[in-house]
Amino acid sequence: MKRKLPEHIISSVPPKNIFDFSDENSYGGFFVIGYPHWDAYVSAAESEFWIGVVPNINLTERTIELPKIERDEKKKRAKKVHHNFEPFFDSIPKRIIRLAGRYNDSHWDLVKAIILLGKDFEELIKTNPAMAYLIVKLNEINTTFQLYNETELLKKLIRTKQKEILRLAFFPATESMRKILGKINPEFISRESFILFNRFIVTAQKRSDRIIKLLTHIDSINENLMRLLSYFPELSLEISNKLISELINEKDFDALIIKLERIRKRSASVNIPFPKISLVAEINTVDKTNLERVREKKKALESFPAPPIDGNEIITPLLTVKEQISWSRKQRNCIKDFTGSVKRKRSYFYKINFEKEEATLEIKLRNGEPVFGDLLGTGNKKVSPELRTYVKRWFSNAQNKKQN
């Protein structure tokens, strides 16, 4: 049976503006009410319940992404229905298609905003397309604000107080920020990158105004700069404005960014400062130097100071963090928590294998001098008298040898 929209939805809409893209065998009803009404509804098969939806449309390619409904895989797959979308797109004024089609996505929302906000919004798309896109995405950036409920306020703000729109999006409410948005080509704007860009600017103004200064003085914000700030925010705050300015115009931008991000993460892993890089030509050399420095730092972090007393075939010093943690797990004791004490030269730990008996010895360091500490077996149990006697003799011999 042919599906129909409820009368209360279509009573004021001319039939020519209602486009039926339903597929009874697949997802039930899907109707788009075209320009200038601009609504869409979907219902599941055999359901009388209709839900308002935001279709994913592309004004440039003249396509509509049909709703995806889970289907019973046991049922025979229905033959695909081919819809003619041309009449729907033909109903939209060409000037609106040109304006909203300048962007990569959100075409449905952009047309809706043009309908609601009128000529002032159309002019804003021409003069500051990123600011216009910000209005469309305000409800995603600031969930307390709803475009459809605040149209009169927005009309006023577009005409007289565009900086207030910035404040609603948590951007700096300044003329320089408004001009920064004006430097973004709509071809470089996508929903994900734009929202990430917003988050970065909000964070950056708390940590540094350097990026804001760069954006203020740069002639235009190209795709590479947009990607850098949106997807590599931590890196953006590490590298200099001079390097950014050169980097965003490099043909090997992607490879260079990956290398710089690798340097940043590598440095952070051992808590050393990000190296100073002034020019793109320095990146490869700095990368090699940084790699070596990080390796040395990791080695230093992993290796303990020299043991206060040399070991033997039975009593062996634990020389690295890895060795101490591994022996701690095997012995079921807590010396894994005292690697810092060894690094600070307050203690040293030895593993003992004496006649099939295992144990752990702690030698404490007082003013740099070794002091006999805890000697415990597996699970912190007492060791045999024979093992304790052997270890005590080893310790005493080492002390006597040192004194002589």
Image (cartoon, helix red, strand yellow):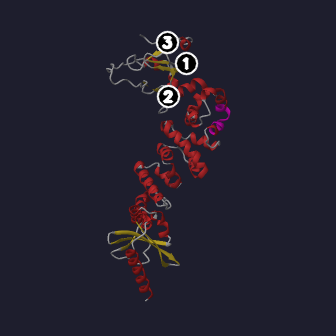
Q: Amino acid at mark 3?
A: Lys
Q: Find residue 393 and report its horizontal and vertical position in percent.
A: 40, 81
313 left or right, relative to 12 = left
What's the magenta region?
157-166
208 left or right, relative to 390 = right
Q: Find residue 241 and report its horizontal and vertical position in percent.
A: 53, 53
Q: Is residue 371 above or below residue 225?
A: below
Q: Find residue 34 and report its horizontal and vertical position in percent.
A: 51, 18
**Label 2, on which residue?**
107
Q: Is residue 163 magenta?
A: yes
Q: Mark 3 or mark 1, which has the lower sequence index? A: 3
Residue 127 in view of the camera: no
Q: Mark 3 or mark 2, which has the lower sequence index? A: 3
SS type, badge 2: helix
Q: Mark 1 or mark 2, which has the lower sequence index? A: 1
| Marks 3 and 1 close (CB-CB < 8 Å) | no
Snapshot quadrant of residue 117: top right
Q: Quadrant of the N terminus?
A: top left
Q: Is residue 383 above or below residue 72?
A: below
Q: Nearer the viewer, residue 76 or 358?
A: 358
Q: Which class describes the residues within 10 Å of circle 1: few (<14), some (14-19), or many (20+)?
A: some
Q: Amino acid at mark 2?
A: His
Q: Find residue 140 and report its horizontal and vertical position in percent.
A: 56, 35
**Label 1, on which residue?**
37
SS type, badge 3: helix
**Label 3, on which residue?**
16
| Residue ID at (61%, 50%) | 206
Q: Is residue 177 above or below residue 31?
A: below
74 left or right, relative to 128 = left
Q: Amino acid at mark 1?
A: His
CA gap, disc 3 and disc 2: 21 Å
